[in-house]
Image: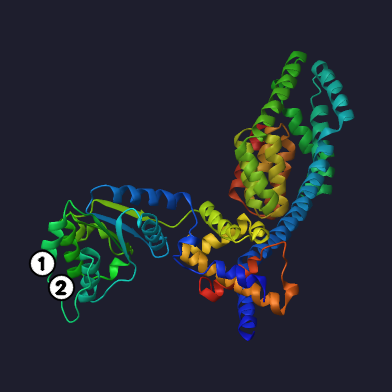
Amino acid sequence: MNSMKELEKKWFRYKLKKSIPWFILFFYLILMGVYINYKVIVDRFIINKYNYLSKTYLKEEEIPVDNTVKKEKIVEVNKTNTLIIKERNDTIVDLNISDDIFDINDTIYEENISEPFFEEKILDDKLPKVKTKNEILEEEIEKRHEKQYIYIKKSSKEYKDVEKRFSLSQDPEDALFLARLYYEKKNYKKAEEWAFIANELNDELEESWLIYAKAKQARGQNAKAIHILRSYLKKKNSIRAKKLLENFINKK
Amino acid sequence: MSRYNKVKNIFIDSIDIDEYIELESAEYSYNLIYDSVSRPLKMILLYGRPGTGKSILLNRIYQNLKYQKEIHYFDAPSLDQREFFRKFFKVVTLKELPKNTEVNFTTLIDYCKSIQGKREVIILLDEAQMYDTNMLEKIRILSDTRAIKFVISMHKTDNEDLIAKEHFKTRIWESIELVNVSKDELKNYIHKKLLKHNMFDIADTIKSKHINLIYNLTKGNFRECNKMMFKTFEIYEYYDLDEKYKINAKRFSKKFIEMAAIRLGYIK
């Protein structure tokens, strides 16, 4: 009888030993579940934050009423050669974005709008900026084409991978990489967007400032680009920024 | 007394022909030996791992042919040569060797030659791995007389290839290897054993999962399987007498199989 009890104890020990791998697997699955859950929560948080930032950014860019106004004014511009109106409208819209992104000298800049250096320089700009109705229409068509192109590129695996990684890592280097990539691909809007994100995460990244300024300039917002570079130069004495600023001023 | 006492005794390892269970693979080996014995061959080798059913197969051949042929079954090996030849002298000459006398091997060979063509004596040698090389050499010489036919049963181990052994190289005319059985055959074996003793209800509770477990533990070896089943029903018997509530008559216990395996040292 004792031997049978002993045998039963041995059997319990055997079963326990045999079930250890199952216990390990069970705990592993639980840990995995917790980890995935945590990841989902973090991802959701990051996505929400990103969406919020994108929305505010887009809202500022869209302003449909302004666009129509802008278009109307452009038509008038062709007749009267008053290019300033267009430039000013653009600048005002961009200024609002800048206020959120680079919170340096916002008020000063707004004040600067009325200051003569903008107007004078813009007024110095001559005929090449005066466009005919057809040219404006062509530009519009090109812009639409550009948008489609951007959409295709956005869906490419290379971009997606880094974007996906960024959503997890929140690494400013990733954002900067994307900004650089988009800038190289001449997707200035996206480049601007990612440079902005990179800058928000780490405003010490010189390249984020430069890409942001370059993207602005490429999108025809020269005054805004100059303002960004000047703001940065106040913050840091950068040779590259200086050279770029000179470039932009000369282009005017 | 518990009914499991009777069940456990079904699995006592024996070479009793009444306990023989006809399985497909065993039947195939039986037919091979039967055919070989009927042919004018000098030596037939039956080999396999312990517990693969060699002895019961030899016994079955002996039982089935003993009234038809001059067949003799040496179930226990004679380690002493004198004892072996005394036994051999008796079956060949049909006379007892006088006391205090020894068989002269040369005279024995001459006698075997003299009966060649007149008689055909078949000797079934079980556990022949116990014989030494010298003895096996003498058996080979005796088989060369063509009057004596030997069916030799031997264990096969990992280290030796019996067929490659020098004294068998040229003499073996037929070699039959017995191997462990498959899962299906093991299931048939256990079920048939129980059904033979009218244990239908117990046979019905032993499902494939139990067979799989038994097979994994015994590797389809009859002897190991018998030991395992005996031990399992011994545990059943204990609980049936002392803690009956631990027995579920409708379901065969995996726990008891594992306990039996622990007791037999198959698992630790």
Query: Is B44 located above or below residue A229 in the figure?
Result: below
Report which residue position mark 2 lands on: B103
- Residue A252 - label: none
Disc 1 + disc 2, Cβ < 8 Å:
yes
User: Is residue B159 toward the left or the right of residue B181 in the image?
Assistant: left
The quarter of the picture where the C terminus of chain A appears is top right
Read off the chain for label 1. Answer: B
Q: CA distance from mark 1 to mark 2?
A: 8 Å
Q: Residue at x 61, y 42 (%)?
A: A180
User: Is residue A147 toward the left or the right of residue A68 in the image?
Assistant: left
Residue A136: image quadrant is: top right
Q: Secondary structure at mark 1?
A: helix
Tag 2: amino acid = Val
Query: Is A225 located above or below residue A78 in the figure?
Result: below
User: Is residue A145 toward the left or the right of residue A106 in the image?
Assistant: left
Q: Secondary structure at mark 2?
A: loop
Label 1 Cα crowd, 10 Å radius (few <14 / some 14-19 / many 20+):
few
Report which residue position mark 1 lands on: B107
